[in-house]
Image (cartoon, grey):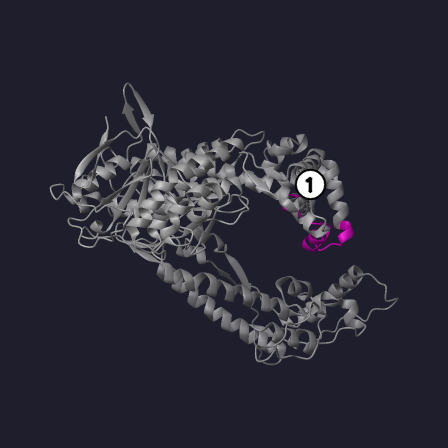
Amino acid sequence: MGFNYFIGGRAKRQWPGEPGRVQGEEDIGARGRWPSPGPEQVTGYRLAVCWGAKDAYYISFQEKNVKVDLDASLSAPPNDESISVYKRIQEVTSTLELSTISKGSQRSTIHRVAFDVKEQLKILVQVFGCVFSGIIEDPKVAHWLLDPSAKEKNLHGMISQYLPTQAGILDNIGGGIGLSSLGISPQNPGSARLRACVESVLLLDLMESLKKGLSDNHLLDAFRKIEMPSIMTLAYVELNGFGFNPDECETQKVFMQSKLSALEEQAYLLAGRSFSLTSPEDIAQVLFMELKLPPNGDVIGCNQGRVTMPPRKTLGGRGRGRLPKQFSTSKESLEKIKHLHPLPGLISEWRKMSMSLTKVVFPLQKEKVFNEKLGMYRMFTVYQTHTATGRVATLDPNIQAIPKDFEISLPSVIGESPPHWSGPILSGPATATKGKARRESRRSSVQCKMTLKEPEGLKSAVSLRHAFCPFPGGLLLAADYSQLELRILAHLSQDVKLIRILNADGDVFRQIAAQWKNVEERDVTDKQRQEAKQICYGMIYGIGAKALGEQLEIEEEDAACFMETFRDQYKGMKNFIKQTVDKCRERGFVETISKRRRYLPSINHSNLGARNHAERQAVNTTIQGSAADLVKTAMVQLQQQLSLSFPATRISHRHRDKGKIGLPKCRTRHSQNTRGSVRGAYLVLQLHDELIYEVHKDDLEKVVTLVRKVMESAMKLLVKLPVKIKVGPTWGSLKEI
């Protein structure tokens, strides 16, 4: 059977055996915060549809075309008033929900193409309550797959690159402002109708050109089986939002502000005067000139009188000049001298607290949205998928960046704090190593440390995650892959020793340390275990001996020796890293486990620094990108399985209730959720290697079993993929089960 589109007052029968394109259109803002329109507002939305031959069909949901932006290239769109608005909506929504179509004795899958499909799907869901089926393709995703490191392009940029002969079609709508769909970008010139129709007629040829590139680069499977399904899943995650308790957030804010004030008072007492904790120049003046602490931990230079504070400069009324590098007050620099005096550590605590307030708490309080369906506030974020490694990131607000519980140390008694650092007077030749000086300074700083008395029980825990909660009657469930990147490395490198350890039970890093040190597992110290863990992840992230030495608080030479003996013990890992870099140098790109590519032109750069950076990126992208592929695969498979086990979860928390616009409820068993009747499990956050769901408490046991089964078998690897599951009433109070 065909199906009818009511356009221009007459029915036009079409066979969608070929991909059809659906273009949402409305002059409203982007970023996914679409209003929930009332019944009378639905008529403000329109669609442009095209099946080929550069013919666009514009579907209006108005009773009368009171305001029509006519264009010389567009015919007037008369409406057949005998066809009600709700009949048009019903026909369009039922068509969008079809996954296959009969053609003779066979059924073929419907393909749809939309530009920036995630944003368009969110509009259609909130306006018409659609539950999408079939295959959907997005040129933006295809373009990203072909070159993940390239700058994100809008429709104008893609047409210029892939279809330059058709660029003239865009002449009447300006140069293309923004990166979203033209139909939902009111800042672009031209009528909304023209923008929507022009976009719809260009998409099919553009998608065909991109799919040829995907096929040539063996990326079609990744596009169809991983990336597009994950985009659709993330659209539903954005629509679900994350439950938010503003009262708990306010409680944390007041607590943090009081602690921030207390930290300021303690800092002034330690400095002997007040100063600006937001000014690097003031901090440097106090630490390096008044307290005479060694800049950047340079104990030798400080004792030999080589370190002096430069005079302050003004730059034509534009503020103070930048301090020399050795007077840095960065986090790393303060870390190097915090053992010499209590103030640097206190400044670090103050910065952490201040950053949490300004970058997390205040933005969160502005972004909360009340959800009528659930009767609670929700936090709606946007997922950025255009990243070099393939890992998704959250924006506006960045929920992924909300820190775990952290403690602040707040001393209550100040003893006789020394007016300046009384470090060691170094004896012997000036050629003494910095490492030796650093060790001696640590031993000599005990007296300085003792002047700041910290009675037990004064450490205060801060947890911003307690403000995030599930829907009423639900619990939060967090499923996290254990040592995922290390397991990906073991699989790709086929290192026999590492595979054997990861497939055995027990403490993974303790077993790795035992192999590395050639000792019994029971004889491995906590320090050796931590060293093994940091070396493992250091190899994944490509850190050098200097950075590792700073992490382990050992000399660079010792760190280099650690890394070399570790590589010798795990030769498969060592060979894989070398082969990855060599192959990248030969081909110019690396591949993840799903064949996604990242091009690294600097791998053959003449500059040593640029070349080394590209080599680290080659290893990191291969491992981290493969981990992202696996998490996306698990996320998609879980969404499919949860939809089968709990059909109501196909309806997000922001789906339009069809009954409110005169349409019947979903055609099949997928009932709409109403307040107090939410069942099943809904994905609310993707946090790198972790998926967080809100689950009705009566469905928890079933969901736990399903989540563990799907995630642990998402891909067939040479190593196990154990999943750690935690459950709790808030994000900050999850407990492992």
Residue at x 65%, y 39% (from the top left corner) = 584
In the image, taking residue 593 as reference, residue 679 lies left or right, namely left
In the image, taking residue 150 as reference, residue 29 lies left or right, namely left
In the image, taking residue 264 as reference, residue 89 lies left or right, namely left
Which residue sits furthest top?
105
Give the image location of residue 418, x and y in percent: 69, 77
Residue at x 31%, y 28% (from the top left corner) = 100
The residue lying toward the viewer, choosing from 306 and 68, is 68
Q: Is residue 557 magenta?
A: yes
Give the image location of residue 17, x and y in percent: 32, 28
All told, the count of numbered labels is: 1
Q: Quadrant of the N terminus?
A: top left
The residue lying toward the viewer, choosing from 646 and 416, is 646
The overriding secondary structure of the stretch rendered in magenta is: helix
Rendering quarter of residue 413: bottom right
Residue 142 visible in the snapshot? yes
Q: Name above or below for residue 504 compared with residue 130.
A: above
Which residue sits furthest left?
82
Rendering quarter of residue 575: top right
Give the image location of residue 272, x and y in percent: 62, 80
What kind of element bears circle 1? Answer: helix
Q: Residues within 10 Å of mark 1 (few under 14, many from 20)?
A: many
Magenta segment: 539-558
Rendering quarter of residue 510: top right
Residue at x 31%, y 53% (from the top left corner) = 34
Q: Is residue 517 magenta?
A: no
The residue lying toward the viewer, choosing from 78 and 511, is 78
Residue assigned mark 1: 513
Residue 478 visible in the snapshot? no
The three-letter code of the residue at mark 1 reads Ala
Which residue sits furthest front?
72
Residue at x 76%, y 62% (from the top left corner) = 438
